[in-house]
Amino acid sequence: GSGFIIDPAGYIVTNNHVIKGASEIQVVLDDGRSLPARIVGSDPETDIAVLQAAGDRLAVASLGTSDRMQVGDVVMAIGNPFGVGQTVTLGIVSATGRNQLGITDFENFIQTNATINPGNSGGALIDTLGEVVGINTAIFSESGGSHGIGFAVPIQLAHKVMQQIIDHGHVIRGWLGITGQDLTPTLAESLGIGFREGVMISGVLDDGPADQAGLKPGDLITKIDHRPIGGSPQMLETIAARAPGTPLTVTLYRGENELEQVAIVGERPAIKGR
């Protein structure tokens, strides 16, 4: 696996799947030094982990702004593919905002055709200024090798996760205790209701924040805090961004009636077994 240093104190970012289950970690720098490292914390839901290495004179990566990346921008993927040593590959941003790929729970990937192979995971995706814009995380492949479709976690998303791991040892996210599916014209027709963009609640956890606020299966969520919700990924990210204990206004349709319910956000439970 690969990673990059983000702080002179030795904090290193990599993928959760790179260090999962590890009992001992050694970090090898490009100057040949091998340093022991400890796991500060990890977040399976974005596949990000933070380590801390014991050392000095550590070169720190410069973090860029992934929100400004556009299709066609030139990027380079740095890593250690197949263990051959530090390697840089060149490509472009093929797409942004990729989600619903089934790779992680919170997906907003940069897609690139810069060659990414096993061993690149956790390495930096950098722009032409040499600034990190993403963390190489996954490839789409039927053979195990690169087919020119790689995915990186945007550094804007990763930075929030990294800071929470450093501050708290884990990531704190908001949670309502509901499951849902996007309302499509076909689903709306089968249910005999008018089509509106939103998320249909399919399940509500007993005595969870949504249940306590009066939300029910079959309710169609169209807005959260008066902002339109277009689909499940947006709803998940919006709720997760809220601090536990804060109120959140949910606009929904129950049948043909529009309602507003106020829920008190809970803390998203940690996922076990990952």
Image: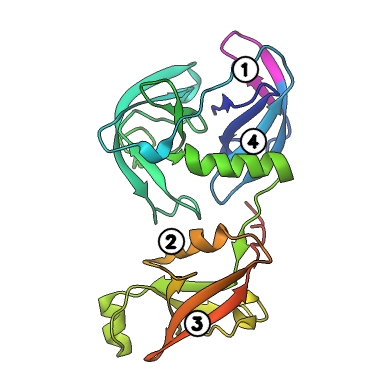
* Residue 38 appears in the rendering: yes
Mark 3 or 4, closer to the camera: 3
Tag of residue 28:
1
Q: Identify the residue under disc 4.
A: 50
Label 3 Cα neighbours within 10 Å, binned few <14 / some 14-19 / many ≥20: some
Q: Is residue 240 magenta?
A: no
Report whether 34 appears left or right of 73: right
At mark 3, the secondary structure is strand
Residue at 69% over, 47% down: 170
At mark 2, the secondary structure is helix
Tag of residue 84:
none
Q: Identify the residue under disc 2.
A: 234
How far from the left and from the top, in percent, is residue 250?
50, 75
Q: Earlier in the sequence, mark 3 or mark 4?
A: 4
- How many numbered dots are placed on residues in this image? 4
Which of these two is toward me, 271 or 126?
126
- Calculate the distance from the C-alpha at mark 3 to the C-alpha at mark 1: 54 Å
Q: Identify the residue under disc 3.
A: 260
Residue type at mark 1 is: Val
- Calculate the distance from the C-alpha at mark 1 to the C-alpha at mark 4: 16 Å
How far from the left and from the top, in percent, is residue 147?
30, 35
Relative height, residue 19 to residue 98 (above, below)? above
